[in-house]
Every structure is written in C-alpha cells, then in structure tokens.
Image (spheres, rainbow, N blue to C red):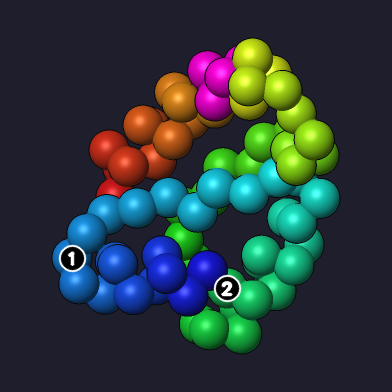
Amino acid sequence: MHDIVELEGRGVPGVYVASSEFKAAGEAQAEALGYDPAAVYVRHPIQDRTDDEMKAIARDAVNDVLKAVRAA
C-alpha cells in the first residue's frame, strides 16, 4: 500500500493488486493512510500456485488492472 501511495504521489498511476484474503486489511490500511487506491483482488492463495496457475490468475486480472490504470 505504501508503494502505491508513493508512486501515485510522484504522478505515476498505479493499481494495488492483492489476493482476496487481504481485501479488508488493504482497505483498512488505505483508510488509515487517507488514500483510496484503485485496487484489484485476485484469487487466494497465490504462494503455492504453479507457473501456469499464476499465469491464469494474471490473465483473469489484466483487464481489470488496465481498466483501473486508464481511469487513474
């Protein structure tokens, strides 16, 4: 969260991407920082996924990420 705040503070549009398990925590941290980032949440968990599974998660999320960046 701090990275996306820093980047956007420098004028670089970005999107916060996290697994769905961390949605509440991300929203709480954003609120604590007084920030409302564009966010995309992907399937959880991701740490034990195969390369092919990670590619599928990325393919599923890419349009949402691009849409959020364009809206920034």
Predominant SS of the magenta segment? helix
Q: Earlier in the sequence, mark 1 or mark 2?
A: 1
Categorize mark 2 by other alpha carbons within 10 Å: few (<14), some (14-19), many (20+).
some
Give the residue at x 38% y 32%: 67
Disc 2: which residue:
30
Q: Amino acid at mark 2?
A: Ala
Residue sitting farthest toward the left: 11
Quadrant of the rendered image containing residue 54: top right
Residue 51 magenta-drawn?
A: no
Q: Nearer the viewer, residue 57 or 14?
A: 57
The answer to whether residue 26 is above or below residue 23 is below
Note whether residue 35 is visible: no
Residue 57 magenta-drawn?
A: yes
Q: Is residue 71 left or right of residue 60?
A: left
Disc 1: which residue:
11
The answer to whether residue 70 is above or below residue 53 is below
Give the residue at x 36% y 31%: 66
Give the residue at x 75% y 56%: 22
Do residues under tags 1 and 2 come within 8 Å of each other at their CB atoms?
no
The answer to whether residue 5 is above or below residue 14 is below
Q: Amino acid at mark 1?
A: Gly
Can you give x and y, in whole percent of width and height, for residue 37 in the image? 46, 61
Q: Is residue 20 left or right of residue 15?
A: right
Secondary structure beneath dot 1 equals loop
The answer to whether residue 68 is above or below residue 25 is above
- In this picture, which residue range is highlighted in magenta? 55-59
Q: Alpha-carbon distance for marks 1 and 2?
A: 18 Å
Task: Point out which mark residue 55 bears.
Answer: none
Q: Is residue 13 left or right of residue 54?
A: left
Note whether residue 16 is visible: yes
Can you give x and y, in whole percent of width and height, for residue 25 in the image? 74, 67
Secondary structure beneath dot 2 equals helix
